[in-house]
Amino acid sequence: MREDLVWFPGSLITFGGFFTFIYMLVKVDNAQKQAESAEYVYEKVLSSLLVMTSGALIFPMFIGLIIGILGLVMTRKYIMGLAFVTIFLSTMSFNWIGFLASFGGSILAFVIFPKDNNQTT
């Protein structure tokens, strides 16, 4: 049974990472569009502040991309160290869905992955 599900933690981690990447990309894009469509002075000031703070969202966007790539690697190679790395990286993805998917996939990897590294395919 466990041999049939070894791809599942990696796919959860991949989903969480790429969801975080796309979510942050959409947030930054919406902030830039809102700044361009501002009509009044106070809207321009507030939207420019929003664009400045959206620059901070680039960090979790790239963290999500790294998590997604590590999840793709974990669907093929069952490396326990990557599960540790994705646990710590998943705490830096600033959305709940991406965090829960990647963190849950990392925890599930400890349960499902074979204990012997010689069993990898």
Image (spheres, rainbow, N blue to C red):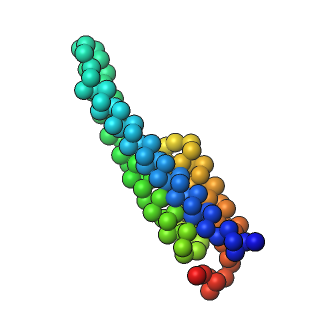
Q: What residue is shown at x 49% (from left), y 48% (from top)?
A: 19
**Location of residue 89 with respect to 54 vertically, above or below:** below
**Location of residue 107 with respect to 50 vertically, above or below:** below
x and y percentages locating residue 51 in the rendered image: 30, 32
Residue sitting at the far right: 1
x and y percentages locating residue 69 in the rendered image: 45, 63
x and y percentages locating residue 85 in the rendered image: 52, 64
Instruction: Say which of 21 and 46 sits in front.
Output: 21
Q: What residue is shown at x 71% (from left), y 67% (from top)?
A: 111
Position of residue 66 in the picture relative to residue 109 (left or right): left
x and y percentages locating residue 117 in the rendered image: 62, 82
Q: What residue is shown at x 64% (from left), y 55% (from top)?
A: 104
Position of residue 23 in the picture relative to residue 110 (left or right): left
Residue 84, by quadrant, is: bottom right
Q: Can residue 99 be seen in this snapshot?
A: yes
Residue sitting at the far bottom: 118
Position of residue 111 in the picture relative to residue 42 (left or right): right
**Location of residue 41 with respect to 59 vertically, above or below:** above
Q: What residue is shown at x 45% (from left), y 42% (from top)?
A: 23
